Image (cartoon, coloured by chain):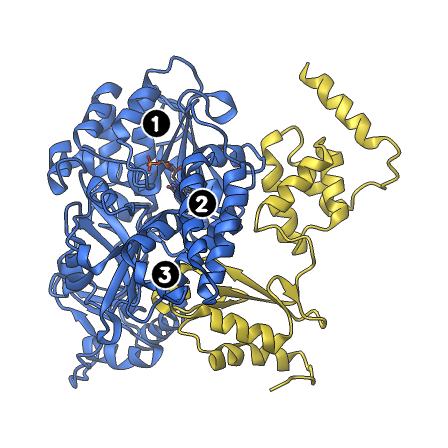
Chain colours: A yellow, B blue
Amino acid sequence: MKLQTKKRLKKNVYKGDTMPPPPPELAEMLAKYHGQPDALITVLEEIQRHYGYLPRHHLEYTARELSFPLSQVFGVATFYNLFQLKPPGRHQIRVCTGTACHVGHSKVILTHLKEKLGINEDETTPDKLFTLQTVACVGACSLAPVMVVNEHTHGRMTTDKSWQAIQPLHDENDVTEVES
Amino acid sequence: MTRSIRIGMSTSDIAAGAEATFRAISTYINRHQLPVEVKQTGSLGVCHREPLVEVDINGHSTLYGPVTPARVTPLLDFHFGTDSRGVSTEWLISQQADRNDYPFLGKQVKVTTQLCGLIDPHSLDDYLAHDGYQAFKQALTMSPAAVIQAIQDSKLRGRGGAGFPTGIKWDLMRKRPISPKYLICNADEGDPGAFMDRAMIEGDPHRLLEGMLIAAYAMGATKGYLYVRAEYPLAVSILHRAIQQASEYGVTGQNILGSGLDFEFVIKEGAGAFVCGEETALMHSIEGKRGMPRMRPPYPAEYGLWGYPSNINNVETLVSVPSIILNGPDWFAKLGTETSGGTKAFALAGTIKKSGLVEVPMGMPLRELIYDIGGGGEAGRTIKAVQLGGPSGGCIPQSLLDTRIDYDDIKTTGAIMGSGGMIVLDETISMVNMAHYFLTFTQDESCGKCLPCRVGTRKMLNILERLVNQEGTQNDLDQLRRLCDTVGRTSLCGLGQTAPNPVLTTMRYFEDEYLAAIGK
Ligand SMILES: Cc1cc2nc3c(=O)[nH]c(=O)nc-3n(C[C@H](O)[C@H](O)[C@H](O)COP(=O)(O)O)c2cc1C
Ligand code: FES
C-alpha cells in the first residue's frame, strides 16, 4: 500500500522532467536519507550547511530523489527561519533583537548598520560581502546589545563600535567605496 | 597538593572573551611548567562578571571575574608564583568554596544548575564523581508506578511555562497500553531573552540524559528525542558527545543495566521557529513537516509522534528529576510552596545591575530576587516593572513585586511564570514600546494556520504602531482591548492565546502611558 503511493508520486514528479541527475555531492547527501519521511528538515539543514543556502534546483532534486511532493519541500524550506533561499554574502552580520538587547537599544544599531551598508534586513550588499540579519537572543544577554559577525559575538555595542567591528572585513576585501 | 583552575566556557563566557583568557592561561602554565589542571566548565551563571576563572588550591577556591587576558599573569603570579603584591579586589568575586560570600550566589538554591560551572561537561567521569547516574540506578530498583508517585509527591510542575503537574502527565502515559511510546525533551527555548535550558545543557548534559532515562523507565518509552533550538550549536555538540558517552557507559541501548528497559536518544535540531516550542507543532517538526500546531485534544499522550503516545517535557523539568529521586520527593516539595515544589531558574537580564542565570526556591518574592540577588536597577535607576515569560508573558509592576515566585501567585497578576525569562525594566523604558516589541515578535512568528492569530496579531500590531508613533486615538485603545479578547480566546494554540498578555498587562498597570500615547 505504502509502496504504491510512493511509486505514483515518483511518476508524477518525473513527468516531463528534463533535469539531469543531481551533482555527485548532493546525490551523496540525499542517498543517506532514502525512505526516511522524517528526514526532510535534516536534509535541508545539511544542504544549507554545504552550500550556504538552499539553491532552487537542489530543492527540486531533493523532492525528486526522496519522493516528496515539491510543494512539501518548498513548504518546509519557507516555513523555518533558518533556511535561506538566496545566496548569502561572504560575511554574515546578525544583530540580536532579543528582549534584553531590545531594552539595550539594539534597534539603533540595526538602523545604523542598515544605513551604513545601504541594505535592509535579510539583504546582501551588491558586492556580495555582507548579509545583514537579526536573531532573537544568542544567550549573551548580559552583554546587551549584542551583534554576531560570522561566528564571533561582540557585546556592549554602540553604533560606532558596531561599524568598527565590520570595517576590517570591509578593508580586508580591498573595497574602496567605503563611506564614512 | 592539588591545584586546578576552572574557566567558564559556555556560550555567554565565550561571548565575553573567555577563549582569549583560556589561551593566556594555557600559555602561562606551559611557560612556567606548572602542574595545574585547567578545566573548562559550563556557566556558573554570574554572567555580569564573565569571563570567570576559579583557582582551586587544596579545596580552597577563589573566584575571579572578569578576567581579561591582561589580568591572567598578575592573577596566576599571585597564586602560583612568588609575586605577593596581590590582585585587585575589583576582580575578586568570592573566596569561599560554596561562594556564598557573594550575595548574587549566596541567596540562590541550586538544584538543576548545581554542577554548572563546576564540572567539565565533556567529562562523564566528572559527572559520575558527583553521584552521576545514581538516581537512575536507584529508580531501576523502584517500580515505574513508584517513580511516578515520587514525582507527584515532589509537586514538580512543568517548567516549560504552563506548569502542568509532571507526575500526572507521566501517569497518563504509563497507563496507555500502546507501544512504542516516545519521550520528547523540549529544548527549543523560544523566548527571545532566556537561556536557562541552554546553560543546563552546556554545563551539565548528563543530568538531562539521566532525567530522561528515569522518565523513560517510568513511562515505558523506548525512544527519546531532544529537540534543540537551531541557534545552540555548542549545546548540540555537547549533547552528541554526552549521548556517545552514555552509550559507552551502558545506560542506553537494549536491556539497560539488566532492567529490561530499551532506550535510545535522538537529537533533532530545530530550524528556527518560535511556534515549534508548542508541543503539537514540535511533533510535526520532528516528523519533518512544517511546524504547525493542531487542535488539542487529542493530547500527545493519546496521539503523539506518528500517532503513538508521546510525552513532552521541558529541559528544566527533566533536569529536576534526578535530584528528586536521590534526595526524596519531600525534600524537593519542601524547597517550594504548597502547590509548586522545588526551584526555578531564571535568566535575569535587562536594566539590572547583576544579570545572569539564577536559581531560587519557589516561593521567594520577586523583590528579593531582583534587589538582593540582582542588586537592583542598573546605574541606580528605579525599577518600573519586571517582564516574565517573554512574548507569552506579561509585566509585573514595582508595586506587585512582593508576589511570590509560584505558578498560581504569578497568574493572579495577569502575567505568567513562563519558562524563565526575566527582564527588568527601569523608568527609561516605555511600556507601550515593550508591548509593541513583543507583538512584533509574535506577529512575525505566527504560523498563519488560524485566522485569529494570523490576522488578529497583525491588527493589534498596526494599532500599537500608531500608539508608538503618538498617532493613536481613543478608538484604537478600545479596539485593541477587543482584539486582545478575541485573539486570546479563539486562537488555535498557545502562541495566539497568550499573545495578548504583554498588551493586557501593560494596559492594566500602565494605562497612563497608553493615554499619553493618544495625547490624553
Ligand atoms: C508558542 C509556544 C512556545 C513554547 N515554547 C516552549 C519552549 O521554548 N520550551 C518549552 O519547554 N516549552 C515551550 N512551550 C510549552 C510546550 O508546549 C509544552 O507545554 C512544554 O514543553 C511541556 O513541558 P513541561 O510540562 O515540562 O513544561 C511553548 C508553548 C507555546 C504555546
Ligand atoms: S537578548 Fe540579545 S543576547 Fe539575549
Residue B162: quarter of image: top left
Judged from the image, the secondary structure of the residue bearing numbered disc 3 is helix
Amino acid type, residue under disc 2 in the picture = Leu
Which label belongs to residue B514? 3
Q: Is the Cβ of the residue at disc 1 closer than 8 Å to that at disc 2?
A: no
Q: Is residue B15 above or below residue B267?
A: below
Visible residue check, residue B274: yes
Q: Earlier in the sequence, mark 2 or mark 3?
A: 2
Q: Is residue B365 above or below residue A158?
A: above
Q: Residues within 10 Å of mark 2 (few under 14, many from 20)?
A: some
Spatial distance from mark 1 to mark 2, Cα to Cα?
A: 42 Å
Q: Which residue is mark 2?
A: B483
User: In this rendering, would B296 be left or right of B53?
Assistant: right
Please, is residue B59 above or below residue B86 in the view? above
| Chain bearing mark 3 | B
For residue A122, the mark is none
In this view, B166 is above or below B189: above
Look at discs 1 and 2 and give the one toward the viewer.
2
Quarter of the image with the N terminus of chain B is: bottom left
